Amino acid sequence: MKTYEQINDRIESGKAVVLTADEIMDYVDKKGVAAAAQEVDVVTTATFGPMCSSGCFLNFGHSKPKIRMSEAWVEDVLVYAGIAAVDVYLGATQLRHGDPANMYYPGEFRYGGGHVIEDLVAGKTLQLFALSYGTDEYPRREIRTYFTIHDLNQAIMVNPRNCYQNYNVAVNDSDRTIYTYLGILEPGRKNATYCSAGQLSPLLNDPYYETIGVGTRVWLAGAQGHVYAEGTQHAGDCERTGNGVPMEGAGTLALTADMKQMRPEFVRGVSLRGYGVSLALGVGVPIPILNEEVLQRTCVRDRDILAPVVDYSVDYPQKTGRVIRYANYEELRSGEIEIEGKKVAVGSLSSYCKALEIANRLADEIRRGEFLVSRPIAPLPRHAKMKPLVIREK
């Protein structure tokens, strides 16, 4: 049994033993769980892929004369101005003004909120245009100016839902091509897509939320951030395998960090044809090895993780609940799965390669004493269920 304090002491003294979730399995096979639990202090986990429920708060400071922004756009992308005078919130999926969306189906969605966030982190010069109704203390009614992230007082990423614990594998049972947030799906189950780092993914290595909770320090696109709440749609009360791994989406994390500390290669705007825009993010989470049970759960392998295969032409949009079959991530990463006797090509929207890079970067920062582990101030709920939106008569 170790404590957070003991592990941090070892990190600060440069003595911590840190392995990635990709390395720990073979290490435990070689050393045994008991010996490895004594030796290993931290296991690093990571993921990289589109995370639509992301965005950021920006503070522009005050112009002369002052303005209380009631409507505002950054690079013609609408931002939410229903807060204080020069604070705005930019959502990753917001479309650019005038984007035809799916008017000419399937839409291309070339630029939106996720791309603005990418450009901000990359240090590019962007345009702000804002309007106001004018008040006694904020008399200005219109402003147009140009800025970079370095001109802002704050640029804080605040993401309501990141790092889904598990997720669907999407197929298309219809006779036409469909366009989804999981990519383009060809008719007649000609392809399948998924989005997870599998055995590297944070919450799959801590399935019961024993070390990851509110207040956990995370690596968010290169910046040190933290979990500020359970993520929206967090639903830990779900069907699980014998080793505790959820067989559906289950847990999520709400994350925040300073965008001025982020690295551009881990913050990328995404265009999803026929669906919209999003933001691909890199997230790393350290798991402190407090005991043998925590260590054992970080040894989960792709073959032990089951994801539901779901038809996105009818079953997903109509919410029928039907699952065609479950596929493990070893199958998915092979590039092909079998569905009802038919071989189906599989592609991923997430990058295992980038996730592994993040896990290694985080491990190096911990070894150098630059990144400590943190005890959660509150646990994530294990027994929460997601409520549906019920359509009612007034």
Image (cartoon, helix red, strand yellow):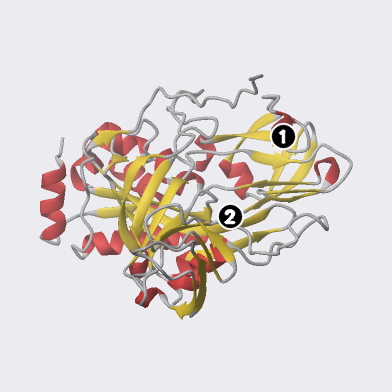
Task: State which mark lies toward you, 1 or 2.
Answer: 2
Near-viewer residue (77 or 381): 77
Residue in the image at 52% along x and 51% along y? 51
Near-viewer residue (346 or 26): 346
Give the residue at mark 2. Answer: 93
Q: Residue furthest right?
A: 175
Callout 2: helix, strand or loop? loop
**Percent x, y of residue 47:** 46, 53
Position above or below: 381 against 229: above
Near-viewer residue (258 or 1): 258
Position above or below: 216 against 130: above
Position above or below: 274 against 160: below
Residue 86: quadrant of the picture: bottom left
Q: Is residue 42 visible?
A: yes
Amino acid type, callout 2: Thr
Give the residue at mark 1. Answer: 317
Amino acid type, callout 1: Pro
